[in-house]
Image: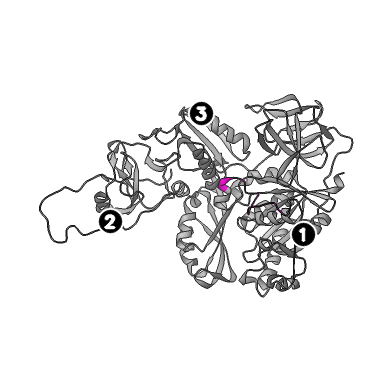
C-alpha cells in the first residue's frame, strides 16, 4: 500500500512561484474537473496570504498521478515562519526545491533546505521562471544550477543528495522540461509542454514512506484543524499500523506545566486529502497523511497511539526565539471606541491559543498583571499575529520588539544574523554605509549580472552582512527607500556574538500632541517644517499621541489642534492656499520598525496609532537615549 504513496513538500524563497506551481500540479493531475472554476493560488487560504502574496501557514493537498498518491505540503518561504517548516518536514520523505532562474538560491531557501538535508530527504531541483529576459541566453540559468550545487555541498549534503535531478520550468505557464535545450521552443510556444516530467521525477526519485511493520498505530500531530461538526482535528503522517472509526485511541501530550499526560478517546471521524478537500474514510493506513477527530485537546507535537503502551515520539523541536514583544491591555484615552477593549484575561487566553497552534511562539507572564510577553522569530511573524487579532475585533497595545540576550562565561551575547541583499550596483555604497552604522560586517560582495528593472537595464550585486539582530530592527523600510524599491532583502540567524555595544534605534525624535482635540490644517501647516507628519487634518488626537517624526534628535511636544484666529482685517496674499509637504502612512510593519522602548502601538480594528507610554508631557523627558 505505501509503495503507491509519495509525501513531498515544496521549498522556495518568498515569491519564487511555489504556490503557483502547486496550482498547476493540482490542475494537471486531474484532481479538479475541467469545468471546475479555480482561482489563482488556491493554497493561499488565509486573507493575509492573498493580500501579501506569501505563504504563512503550511497546508496539505493530495493528487493522484497514474496509480500513485502524492501528498503535497506547501511550506512557508520566510524564516520568520520557521516553526511551520520544521514540523512539516517530519511529515514528508522528499522535497522539490524551487529556485528563481534569475535570483538563484536566497537565504530562506538555505534555511529550509538545511532542515530537509539534515533529515536525509532527497531533493529535486526545479529552476523556475526560465522565461525571464535575464535568462534568455541560458547562461544565468547555468550559474543558478551551479550555485544550487555549491549550496548543497556547503550544507553537508550526502553524495546521493548532491546528485539531484533538475527540471527547468515556468510554473505560471504550467510546463517544465529536464532538457534545457527545449526551453526556447517551450517559451516561444513552438512546443507544447506540461508538468509531466516533474510528476515522473517525484515518483522515481522520492522514496515511498518507511513504516514499522507489525507495530500498532502511531502518528505525530504536526498540524491542527477545526471542523464545526466534529471539533478539533489532528493532522499528521501515520508512521505505523492502521486506525479505524470507532476505535479506542490515546493522545500522549503535555499539560500547561510541561508534565506528560495520557488521554484516551474514541475516534469519531477520519479523513484524508483529495486535492485540497478532506474526504471522509473508514480507516487510515501507515505511510499516508491523515486527519483524526475525537479529542478536543489535540496539540501540535502530541503522539496519537492505537494502544496505551504506544511509545511517545520526541516532541517537535524548533529553533529558539530571538525576539520578544509585550502585549498590553489598551489603556489609551480612545479605548473601546472601535472594537472590544479586551480585559487581561481575554488577551491572555488569545495569546495562549496562538502558542498552542504555533510551536515557534512562546508565552511569558510579566511583572505587570495586564501585560504579557510573546517570544518569536521576527518582526513579520509578530505583525501577522497582531493583524489576525486586530481582524478578530480586539483592541490592545504592543511595545517595541526586544532582542533576547543570553550570557556565556559571564559575557553578554546577542543573536547574529546573515543579511543577504540583492540590489542595483549604484546603491551599494549607500547601503554598505547604512549597515555598517548598525554594527554590520561586510562578508561578501558579488556581481550577479545584468537584470532588467523598472528603470531599465542595471548591473546588480549581492552583498552579505553579518549584523546583530538589533541592527536589523527597522532596516527593511530604510533599505527599500535607499534602493528605490528595487532591492531584495532577506536574513537568517547564524548564531550568537558578543554584545556589540550601544546602538541608536532611530536618529530622529517624535512630534507628540500636547493636548486632546482634532488636528487642524492650520496647525499642521505651521508644524510642517518641524518634521514629517503621520496624521492628516481632521484626525482626533490625545495628549501623548505621536503625530509625526521630528527632524531633530530629541522629542518635541506640539499643539496640532491650534485654530486660525478669525479677523476682519485682510492683507493681500494672506489667504493663499498652502498644502502639507506630505504625510507618511504608518502601516503596522512601519510602526513596529519605528517605535522606541518608551512607546506603544495602539492597535484597534479601525486604527493604528502610536503613543508614549507616559501620556502626560510634564511627566516624561524629551531627551532620547540609546539602548541600555
With 283 as the anchor, is 558 left or right in this view? left
Height in image: 152 above or below 366? below
What is the distance, in whole Å, between disc 3 and disc 2 at their CAs?
Answer: 43 Å
N-terminal of the pair, mark 3 or mark 1, is 1
N-terminal of the pair, mark 2 or mark 1, is 1
With 413 as the anchor, is 340 left or right in this view? left
Q: Check whether the beta carbons of the residues at disc 3 and disc 1 lie within 8 A of each other.
A: no
Q: Which residue is labeled 3 in the image?
A: 346
Crowding around mark 2 (Cα neighbors within 10 Å: few <14, some 14 to 19, many 20+) is few
Q: Report the front residue among 548 and 425.
A: 548
Quadrant assignment, res 140? bottom right
Task: Report the span colored magenta.
Answer: 35-48
N-terminal of the pair, mark 3 or mark 2, is 3
Height in image: 337 above or below 491? above
Check disc 1 and report its element: helix, strand or loop: helix
Q: Report the front residue among 581 and 539.
A: 539
In front of the other: label 3 or label 2?
Answer: 3
Q: Is residue 38 magenta?
A: yes
What is the distance, in whole Å, between disc 2 and disc 1 at their CAs?
Answer: 60 Å
Q: Residue furthest left?
A: 569
Quadrant assignment, res 2? top right
Q: Which residue is labeled 2 in the image?
A: 529
Amino acid at each position: 500500500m505505501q509503495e503507491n504513496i509519495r509525501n513531498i513538500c515544496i521549498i522556495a524563497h518568498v515569491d519564487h512561484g511555489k504556490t503557483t506551481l502547486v496550482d498547476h500540479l493540482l490542475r494537471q493531475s486531474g484532481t479538479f474537473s475541467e469545468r471546475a472554476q479555480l482561482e489563482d493560488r488556491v493554497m493561499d487560504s488565509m486573507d493575509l496570504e492573498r493580500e501579501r502574496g506569501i505563504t504563512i501557514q503550511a497546508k496539505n493537498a493530495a493528487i493522484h498521478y497514474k496509480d500513485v498518491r502524492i501528498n503535497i505540503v506547501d511550506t512557508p518561504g520566510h524564516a520568520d515562519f520557521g516553526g511551520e517548516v520544521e514540523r512539516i518536514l517530519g511529515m514528508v520523505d522528499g522535497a522539490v526545491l524551487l529556485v528563481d532562474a534569475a535570483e538563484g538560491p536566497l537565504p530562506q531557501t538555505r534555511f529550509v533546505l538545511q532542515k530537509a538535508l539534515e533529515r536525509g530527504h532527497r531533493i529535486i531541483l526545479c529552476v523556475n521562471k526560465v522565461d525571464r529576459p535575464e535568462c534568455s541566453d541560458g547562461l544565468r540559468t547555468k550559474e543558478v544550477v551551479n550555485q544550487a550545487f555549491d549550496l548543497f555541498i556547503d550544507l553537508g549534503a550526502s553524495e546521493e543528495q548532491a546528485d539531484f535531478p533538475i527540471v527547468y520550468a515556468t510554473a505560471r505557464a504550467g510546463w517544465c522540461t529536464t532538457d534545457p535545450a527545449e526551453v526556447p521552443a517551450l517559451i516561444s510556444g513552438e512546443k507544447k509542454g506540461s508538468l509531466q516530467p516533474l510528476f515522473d521525477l517525484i515518483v522515481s526519485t522520492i522514496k515511498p514512506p518507511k513504516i514499522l511493520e507489525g507495530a500498532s498505530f502511531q502518528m505525530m500531530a504536526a498540524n491542527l484543524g477545526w471542523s464545526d461538526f466534529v471539533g478539533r482535528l489532528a493532522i499528521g503522517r501515520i508512521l505505523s499500523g492502521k486506525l479505524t472509526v470507532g476505535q479506542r485511541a490515546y493522545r500522549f501530550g503535555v499539560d500547561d506545566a510541561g508534565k506528560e499526560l495520557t488521554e484516551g478517546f474514541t475516534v469519531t471521524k477520519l479523513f484524508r486529502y483529495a486535492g485540497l478537500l478532506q474526504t471522509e474514510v473508514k480507516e487510515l493506513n501507515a505511510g499516508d497523511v491523515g486527519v483524526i477527530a475525537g479529542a478536543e485537546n489535540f496539540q501540535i507535537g502530541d503522539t496519537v497511539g492505537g494502544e496505551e503502551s504506544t511509545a511517545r515520539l520526541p516532541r517537535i523541536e524548533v529553533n529558539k526565539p530571538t525576539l520578544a514583544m509585550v502585549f498590553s491591555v489598551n489603556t489609551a484615552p480612545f479605548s473601546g471606541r472601535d472594537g472590544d477593549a479586551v480585559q487581561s484575561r481575554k488577551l491572555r487566553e488569545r495569546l495562549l491559543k496562538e502558542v498552542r497552534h504555533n510551536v515557534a511562539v512562546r508565552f511569558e507572564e510579566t511583572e505587570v498583571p495586564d501585560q504579557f510577553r510573546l517570544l518569536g522569530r521576527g518582526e513579520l511573524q509578530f505583525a501577522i499575529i497582531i493583524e489576525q487579532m486586530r481582524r478578530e475585533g480586539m483592541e490592545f497595545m504592543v511595545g517595541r520588539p526586544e532582542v533576547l540576550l543570553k550570557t556565556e562565561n559571564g559575557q553578554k551575547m546577542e543573536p547574529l544574523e546573515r543579511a543577504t541583499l540583492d540590489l542595483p550596483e549604484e546603491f551599494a555604497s549607500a547601503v554598505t554605509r547604512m549597515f555598517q552604522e548598525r554594527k554590520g560586517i561586510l562578508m561578501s560582495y558579488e556581481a550577479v549580472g545584468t537584470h532588467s528593472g523598472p528603470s531599465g537595464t542595471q548591473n546588480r550585486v549581492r552583498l552579505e552582512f553579518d549584523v546583530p539582530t538589533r541592527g536589523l530592527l527597522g532596516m527593511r523600510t530604510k533599505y527599500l527607500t535607499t534602493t528605490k524599491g528595487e532591492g531584495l532583502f532577506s536574513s537568517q540567524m547564524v548564531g550568537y556574538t558578543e554584545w556589540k555595544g550601544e546602538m541608536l534605534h532611530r536618529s530622529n525624535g517624535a512630534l507628540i500632541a500636547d493636548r486632546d482635540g482634532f488636528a487642524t490644517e492650520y496647525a499642521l501647516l505651521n508644524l510642517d517644517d518641524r518634521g514629517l507628519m503621520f496624521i492628516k487634518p481632521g484626525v482626533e488626537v490625545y495628549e501623548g499621541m505621536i503625530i509625526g517624526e521630528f527632524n531633530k534628535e530629541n522629542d518635541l511636544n506640539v499643539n496640532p489642534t491650534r485654530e486660525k484666529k478669525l479677523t476682519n482685517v485682510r492683507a493681500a496674499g494672506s489667504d493663499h492656499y498652502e498644502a502639507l509637504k506630505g504625510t507618511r502612512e504608518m502601516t503596522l510593519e512601519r510602526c513596529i520598525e519605528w517605535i522606541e522602548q518608551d512607546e506603544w502601538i495602539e492597535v484597534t480594528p479601525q486604527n493604528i496609532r502610536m503613543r508614549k507610554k507616559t501620556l502626560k508631557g510634564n511627566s516624561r523627558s524629551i531627551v532620547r537615549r540609546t539602548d541600555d
